[in-house]
Image: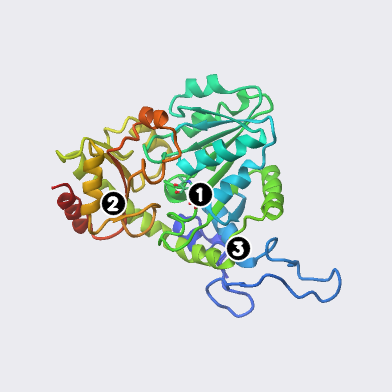
Amino acid sequence: MSNQAHYKGFATTAIHKGQEPDPLTGAVTVPLYQTSTYAQEGIGQHKGFEYARTHNLTRSKWEENFAALEQGTHGFAFASGLAAIDTVMKLLSAGDHVLAAEDMYGGTFRLFDKILRRFGVEFSYVDMTNLDAVKAAIKPNTKMLYTETPTNPMMMLTDLRGVAALKNTAQGAAMLVVDNTFASPYFQQPLTLGADIVLHSATKYLGGHSDLVSGIVATNRADIAEQLKFLQNAAGAVPGPFECWLCLRSVKTLAVRMKQHEENAMKIAEFCAAHKGIQKVYYPGLKSHPQHELATKQMRGFGAMISIELGSLEQAQQFAKKVRVFTLAESLGGVESLVCHPVSMTHGSVPKETRDRLGVTDGLVRLSVGIEDIEDLLQDIEQALS
Ligand code: PLP
């Protein structure tokens, strides 16, 4: 039977950790425990499973697997990426302050600004690429530093070791939470760089096939794990077992998918950077990216998300209309290439002045590079720009 003592590599861990053959039948894939409750032998006598919001073995196996991929000790699965973020924020209380990145997924900003603020949690937003600005913005009641890296959609990086070193400047010490959705644990492991909590929209690379919505969190702190376990059950935003089963299946190919995603993305970024019809390319793998060096230090690769500036809304509309292999759709991280217009699709809830400051313009288009044949993808971009 598989045992982590027998392996160290990422791909082997993804395929075997928590995915040992079923002890009852020998099935080589984790069984799908599609049940809401469990028979008890007598009152108070059960096998450790009482109700499926609290315990589901398919979910536990996925959590165990994911925690290992992020080099954490505990994993917690949720019904969506936002459900994961919402539950993590419930570690806080009214009066606590969160210092968050100003450039992040619009839905996360909406959750903070439109909902959690009403419960007395205080938020301020800072340029997370600037460590001096982060240090200056930490307040006595700062309990959490929250960032995404690379960011959605401007592909800015947070120096995770640098920000982690500032955690203790807050009275009572703040925890560092990192949304690692864009990089995936294959390219970046924030817990090894000083983060306390790492989370993902598993809808993206972890699921990888644009066929599920889910979220997942890992930590290496026992105190945080205990609270998250309580919150996962008490607030109840858990995924169904089938989503967990699909994630277990998908991560078996995460390493090969990420390699191919990145190989394609690098070629597309270089092609776009040389194309006259494109004014700017945002991709941390390009030497022209202002934080390329940081990317080489804290990431094992650069991912497959690229933003391109086409100059105007009309150009963006034309491009989105003309692509044939890329599909115009929200989301990212699937095997199929997608194109998205952040201003009208994912970042509508971010105020216009913030968008303008960050460069989220009407002409900005975001590409999620899939794993199709690179010649087809390049040809598609070429014809859509012509
Ligand atoms: N974090 C990032 C970086 C995202 O891009 C998204 C969704 O696009 C989310 C979180 C939210 O995840 P979900 O859509 O699974 O709720």
- How far apart are labels 1 and 3 at the CA level? 16 Å
Q: Which residue is nearer to you in this view: 4 or 101?
A: 101
Q: Quadrant of residue 337?
A: bottom left
Circles 2 and 1, Cβ within 8 Å, touching? The answer is no
- Which residue is drawn at the image coordinates 75% and 66% (left, top)? 48
Which amino acid is tagged 3?
Answer: Arg
Q: Mark 1 sits on what residue?
A: 200
Mark 3 and 2 residues: CB-CB less than 8 Å, in contact?
A: no
The answer to whether residue 217 is visible is no
Nearer mark to the viewer, of 2 and 1: 1
Q: Position of residue 41 (x, y in %)?
A: 82, 76
Judge whether residue 206 can be spotted in this image: yes
Q: Amino acid at mark 1?
A: His
**Which mark is drawn over residue 282?**
none
Closer to the chain start, of discs 2 and 1, is: 1
The residue wearing badge 3 is: 59
Percent across and percent down for residue 193 are 51, 37
Above or below for 211 versus 228:
below
Residue at far bottom of view: 25
* 43 lies left or right of 370: right
Amino acid type, residue under disc 2 in the picture: Glu
Q: Secondary structure at mark 3?
A: helix
Q: Is mark 1 within 8 Å of ligand 1?
A: yes
Q: Residues within 10 Å of mark 3 (few under 14, many from 20)?
A: many
The front one of 372 and 166 is 372
Residue occupying image coordinates x 62% and y 50%? 73
Residue 24: percent from left, percent from top: 64, 78
State which quarter of the image contains the N terminus.
bottom right
Looking at the rendered structure, the secondary structure element under dot 2 is: helix
